[in-house]
Amino acid sequence: MILILLLWIQFWTLVLSLPRCDPRVRGHCRPIIVDDKPKCTDVLLSYCDDMSYTQTMFPNLLGHKTRHEVESGAEYLLMSVVEALLGGECNPDIRMLGCSVVAPRCEAGRVEKPCRSTCEAVLRRCSHAFDDISMAWPYFLDCDRFFVSDEEGCYNPLEGLRGKCFPQ
């Protein structure tokens, strides 16, 4: 089952990464030009539309330079199927944690990174669910790699959830 899912993810990653045309140019195709200068932009990702913030920044923490790169990336595709794989356990926590990496909060022209303490709390509560299906914790949710300490200034990506208490 997991092998089939991984092959499916690789197939769609390839299909979605094919070059597209800039829709603003009529009559012919040209590649989309990517501005490498980081800037705040609206979060327009369906799996991340209920985050407590509305602005993100590209390139993101994974180096994706556009929304299209995020949507065609394996990380976003995994976020879209992990709920079914885990039988709904740890949702929306895992999805929101993933969104904090693929679409980090942007305030006043500056990216804000998610808190390591929140990542570690979710990891403690949810790692067994991944173990139960013989799946490794997703690399893009590596608490030491993409998350920062409270002292460095961070935000809790789960702050919008009601009725749950997580470290800030």
Image (tube, grey):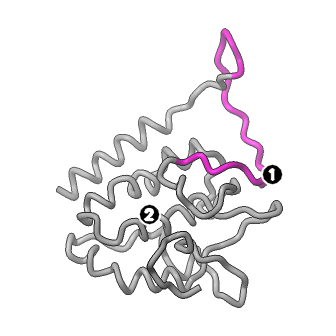
State left or right for residue 122 relative to residue 1.
right
Q: Residue 32's x, y, as percent?
A: 68, 32
Residue displayed at 50% across by 84% down: 166
Q: Earlier in the sequence, mark 1 or mark 2?
A: 1
Between residues 51 and 68, which one lies in front from this camera angle?
51
Check disc 1 and give the amino acid type. Lys
Closer to the camera, 121 or 26?
121
Can you give x and y, in whole percent of width and height, for residue 38 in the image? 77, 55
Quarter-of-image position of residue 104: bottom right
- Residue 113 at x, y percent in the picture: 66, 72
Horizontally, residue 84 falls left or right of residue 57, namely left
Instruction: Say which quadrant the C terminus sits in.
Output: bottom right
Residue at the spot x=29%, y=70% of the render? 89
**Which residue was labeled with disc 2?**
95
- Read off the residue under disc 1: 37
Secondary structure under tag 1 reads loop
Q: Is residue 122 above or below residue 99?
A: below
